[in-house]
Image (cartoon, helix red, strand yellow):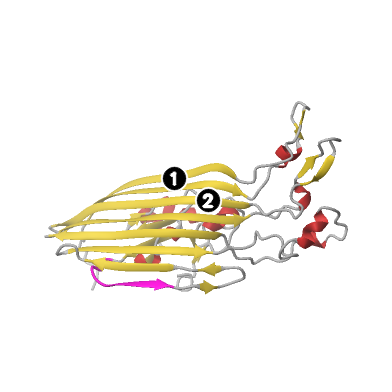
Amino acid sequence: MSNLIPSLTAQSFGSDQANQTLQAKLRGLSPNDVLVLIDGKRRHTTSNLAVIGGPYQGGAGVDLNFIPVDAIDHIEVLTDGAAAQYGSDAIAGVINIILKKTNNGGNSVARTASITTRRHHRPGTGNIGFEPIPGGYLNLTAEARNHGHSFRGGLDGRTLNPNLTYPDSNMKNVSGYPDVNLISGDAEYHSKLGSFNAGLDLEGVQIYSFGSYGDKKAQSYENYRTPSTVSYQGPLTGGVKDYLFPLGFSPLEATRETDYEITGGVKGDLDAWKWDLSATYGYNKVLVYTLNSANAAIAGGYTDITGTVIPGTDSTPRDFYDGFFKATQMTTNVDINRDIDVGLAGR
């Protein structure tokens, strides 16, 4: 799509939790200004706010990773006059994803690819259509993705310091030295997606419904912490005895995300009028964790705001549950329209 539509770009790189979602922007504006539709109905947005600097900063648009690719028939993009038709959240334009409605046939694909340094992509997808009753269709899609970490950075500048002393001099023993800081690269993620699209024509009145469900686990590297980051107190002298992580450590921002949406509606014709009544509910929840980290204050002690010295425990938790983000959206559409002849040329 980016090759066909120069004004459309998709987030291909980020850091922290920002690289765990796939958002699109149009005409250089924020993803928040792009309206994403599924068969003409608004798609709910992610709850994972991009807090990293750059063109996607503050973005909390639709996560396109939760739409199975094999469920898509084609995609329509509207860039001119979109806000006039759809409102202020379509200032940059509209991306309308049209789902497959075939009631027969299908396909499946499984492949493994090593694309860039330390990156592996192993997708599997399948789509099949049925005609459960005459005049109806049921189209089902399932998709699984496994994507490893990639590394597109360079050497860590801290390794160039000629005056490193113990324990930071231990960095030369870290695997991959001098490329010890792995933050520049793709997140690792594992996702399972499923979707359906169904409809039935009852003598001019069409009943339809479609929806999707996705579960995703992801991990993004944080900046490498040097060996001197966490020290602990000696039990006898009260002085610094040693360092808990003589080779340092690389924390991970990890998430467990659940996403689903369902739409149901009826539409038809009444004389020259076309009408469409529908409702959509969308849900996205992200559980946030910090893994392989440490708390230097718990391990080594600290002085509180009253000046009281709080002794350390000589140890620290490594994994933390930070909380969650959740976003829900309910929309109801009533569309009524007809063509009016105003005397202009047409074909």
147 versus 293 height, above or below = below
Give coordinates of residue 20: x percent, y percent: 53, 57
Residue 289 visible in the shown view? yes
- Quarter holding the C terminus is bottom left
Residue 15 appears left or right of 238: left
Give coordinates of residue 175: x percent, y percent: 71, 63
Where, by quadrant of the figure, is residue 247 drawn? bottom right
Magenta run includes residue 105: yes
238 versus 243 height, above or below = above
* Front in this rendered view, residue 38 or 227: 227
Query: In percent of the image, x 19 and y 62: which residue is there?
Result: 132
For marks 1 and 2, the one nearer the N-term is: 2
Q: Residue type at mark 1?
A: Ala
Q: Look at the numbered disc 1 and give the secondary structure of its residue.
A: strand
Q: Which residues are magenta?
A: 101-110
* Front in this rendered view, residue 339 or 238: 238
21 versus 279 height, above or below = below
Residue denoted by label 2? 255
Residue 295 appears left or right of 188: right
Mark drawn on residue 327? 1
* Front in this rendered view, residue 146 or 90: 146
Q: Residue type at mark 2?
A: Thr
Query: In percent of the image, x 61 and y 46: which residue is there?
Result: 319
Give coordinates of residue 24: x percent, y percent: 48, 61
